[in-house]
Each structure stands twice: as structure tokens, then as C-alpha cells.
Image (cartoon, grey):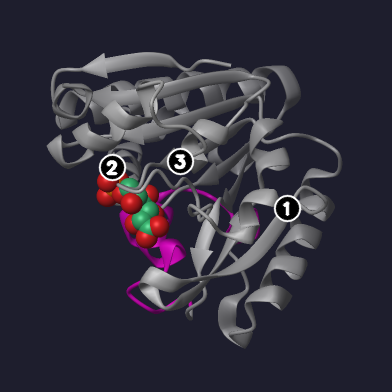
Amino acid sequence: MKAEQKILPDSDRLIEAAAEHFVVTARSAIAKRGVFYVALAGGSTPKGLYQKLATSPYIEQIDWARVQIFFGDERCVPATHDDSNFKMARLAMLDHLPIPTENVHRMPTESGDAAEVATRYANTIKMVMEDNPFDLVLLGLGPDGHIASLFPETPALDVTDTLTTSLFVEKFQSWRVTLTYPVINSARQVIVFIAGEAKADIVRDITSEAVSGLPVQRLAPTGDYYWFMDQAAAA
Ligand SMILES: O=C(O)[C@H](O)[C@@H](O)[C@H](O)[C@H](O)COP(=O)(O)O
């Protein structure tokens, strides 16, 4: 399925539009089902969104006690490490929200054993969400076309029998844990954030017919699917 592209003039406008969209999506899920299940992303564009959501008028518009927060991927480092996606989200947003601690589900990375983290996190997702899909999965886009920690030419791309998987990323010489395609694709909504001129090349590649098989191109969401882009990336 092709993504609906929302192109905003600059990154500030992109973040505002994304924050408004996030509020509408969360409120709608809570009104319909009493809960909003969201998977957060790492990266600088999502970070801008989290900071915005923690401020007025956005913060007051969501009943945070009904929000269940997960992570789409994580670096296999302690939660206090500067590389931790959880730490980034905590400082940007979670510490400032009226959200019960038990509603925030970070990956339990402290053992340092990525395979074990992946198994435990899949169990957490099943326990908390039962058989429900994510209402929203937020994703950044790497310059190599990766989304979450689904990197090009890694075995993680082909994992379909579990909700999460671990992988070693050669270029960063580090272990990651990521949601797999089936769980991302089954979300009610998937958003990919693409900002900055450094992304213009990968945007050209993924929208051209000459390049195929990149992780973002392998996304096939069954629900709503958006790319939130700024003009610099879309150029
Ligand atoms: O280490 C990673 O896997 C990246 O940091 C990733 O998490 C990020 O989402 C994209 O690279 C986009 O990042 P920006 O939003 O900063 O462009």
C-alpha cells in the first residue's frame, strides 16, 4: 500500500502537524476503545514531536492515563545510556506527562542479551495488548532506508513468526531489538517521519522504480499509512 504523503514547509511545521495528528489519533482510539497503544521511534524528528507533545496545548488534550507506551526499537544499552531510545523519550516527553509509570513499557535491556530482551519484550506486548494491534507505530527513516531497527540485508527483515527480534548491526557494531514487519504492518496506523535535506537522496531512491527491497519499501501496512515529510526531504 502506498503511503499518503503529508509535506510540510519546514521541520517546525512538520512537528506541529505531527503533534496535532498524534492528538487526534490518540483521542479517537481512547474514545472508541478506551486505550491508545503507541510504539515510539528514536531519531531527532520523533524527539521534536515528543517535546512538542509535552507542552501546551497538546499535553492537556490527551488522557495520558489511557495511553500505553511501547518502543518500536531499542539499542541494547542500559536505560540510562545516551544511546537509549527510552532515555531520549523519557527526557523529551515521558518525564513531563501525567502518565502512570506502569503505562510505559521500555525494553528490558539491562541484561545486555539482545535475544532475551526481544523475547521478554514480545511477552510484555502480548500481556499488555492481548491480541490488539498497535493504534500507532511511529518510525524514523535512516539514510540507508532502515525503519525501526530493520536494517538492509539483515536476517531481521525476514522474521515473521515473532513480534520482536534481535540483530547485530555491523555498521554500528552494536546489538538492537526491533518490532518485526508483521506487528508493524498490522498496526491501525503507521507514520514514517522524514525530515531534512540529508534525507532527499533516500526519498528519491525509495520513490523511484529503480531501487527496490529497502526496508522502508518492504513496509505493507494494512491500516492507515502516512509519510510526514518536510520540503527539504521531499525535494
Ligand atoms: O540509530 C538509528 O537507528 C537511527 O537513529 C534511527 O533511530 C533514526 O530513526 C533514523 O536514523 C532517522 O533519524 P532522524 O529522525 O534523526 O533523521
Measured from the top left, where is residue 230 in percent x and y? 21, 25
On screen, residue 9 above or below 126: above
**How many residues crowd around disc 3 within 10 Å: few (fewer than 14), some, or many (20 or more)?**
many
> Which is closer to the viewer, label 1 or label 3?
1
Measured from the top left, where is residue 217 in percent x and y? 50, 32
Residues under labels 3 and 2: Cα distance? 10 Å
Measured from the top left, where is residue 150 in percent x and y? 53, 52
**How many residues crowd around disc 2 within 10 Å: few (fewer than 14), some, or many (20 or more)?**
many
On screen, residue 135 above or below 114: above
Q: Give, as a three-letter code, the residue at label 2.
A: Thr
Judging by the rendered image, the residue that carries numbered circle 2 is: 45
Q: Earlier in the sequence, mark 1 or mark 3?
A: 3
Q: Quadrant of residue 222?
A: top right
* Camera sees residue 105: no
Quadrant of the drawing holding the N terminus: top right
Question: Which secondary structure lies at badge 1?
Answer: loop
Q: Give, as a three-letter code, the residue at label 3.
A: Leu
Q: What is the span of residues highlighted in magenta in the rendered image?
A: 79-103
Question: Which secondary structure lies at badge 2?
Answer: helix
Say left or right for 119 vs 46: right
* Camera sees residue 146: yes
Q: Earlier in the sequence, mark 3 or mark 2?
A: 2
Judging by the rendered image, the residue that carries numbered circle 1 is: 159
Mark 2: C-beta under 8 Å from nearest atom of ligand 1: yes
Mark 3: C-beta under 8 Å from nearest atom of ligand 1: yes
Q: Quadrant of residue 26?
A: top right
On screen, residue 60 above or below 1: below
Determine the residue positioned at 59% across, 68% down: 167
Point out which mark residue 139 bears.
3
Q: Residue furthest bottom?
A: 111
Query: Between 151 and 49, which is closer to the camera in this rendering?
Result: 151
